[in-house]
Amino acid sequence: ADYLIDEQEETQLAGQKAYRIISNGGDLADIQIYTASGKKIYELDYWYAQTLTVLPPELQQQLANTFRIMAESFALTTTPPPAAPALDGGWSVYENAPAGFKISYPKAASLTTPERGKVVFTIVQPFAMGRAVMIFEVRVADSQGLSAKDWAVQERTHAWYVIKAREETQLAGRPAYRLTTVEGDGGGFHIFTASGKKIYELYYSDAQSREELSPEARQQLADTFNRMVESFTLINQP
């Protein structure tokens, strides 16, 4: 900073612990008060009116009182979080007979099929500073004679994300293999199962890892994804 600190002290601001600095920048002095709340720092910065020697003492005092009243009026408010997507607004069923599966999904999710053997359900969850894009994908591939576990090991050996945990599980009443991963700004889950000559992979975001979302939104999204996993069904199997 291009000023000298004349005084510094602990104080209070908006009912929070704060730190106050009186700094000298040359012709006049400033007062800065800092407080922290959540992930934010709040700073009040105003002239130290008594150093405005070009003004008469009465006006200096008037300005000092005004600035003091403004500082005392400063309050932190709670901004209500943006509404969660209407995940309870009904469900639909996506069925892909050639690929041999069907799955339920919330109508609030958008559905795309960007390539053969892949369907993507996208839920956009707003929050105070932006939007979180949560995805759930179903991928179908030729198993090349591999089991679900062997496929997971082969497929993820060169993956860019970090694998936190591996476990055997069940999917659609069949043996399956699950990976818990860390990727980008959150985490994810990959569940693999084999049927006939196909490997089925469910991939979905770990809603609980998205700290920018409210606890309620994270739980709602986690419950939604769990319901989608439980609804996944294999059809037209040999």
Image: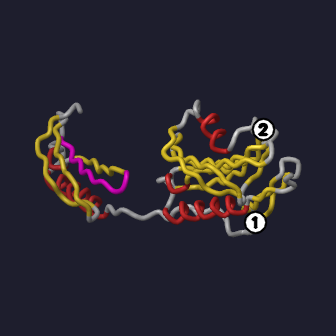
Query: Is residue 199 visible to the viewer in this orientation of the structure?
Result: yes
Q: Quadrant of the N terminus?
A: top left
Residue furthest to the left: 6
Tell me: residue 222, above or below residue 22: below
Characterize the local packing of mark 1: few (<14), some (14-19) or many (20 or more) Cα atoms within 10 angstroms: few
| CA distance for labels 1 and 2 | 30 Å
Which stretch did the figure color magenta? 29-39
Q: Is residue 70 left or right of residue 213?
A: left
In the picture, measured across the screen, residue 29 lies left or right of residue 167, that is: left
Residue plotted at (21% across, 60% down): 12
Predominant SS along the magenta part: strand
Please tell me which residue is depicted at 68% across the width and 49% down the height of the picture: 202
- Residue type, label 1: Trp
| Tag of residue 142 | 2
Q: Nearer the viewer, residue 102 or 173?
A: 173
- Compared to residue 226, the image places residue 177 above or below, namely above
Where does the image place residue 185, in percent across and percent down from the top left?
Answer: 51, 43
Residue behind mark 1:
91
Total tally of numbered discs in the picture:
2
In the displayed structure, would residue 183 be above or below residue 43? above
Callout 2: 10 Å neighbours few (<14), some, many (20+)? few
* Residue 126 picture location, percent across and down: 58, 55
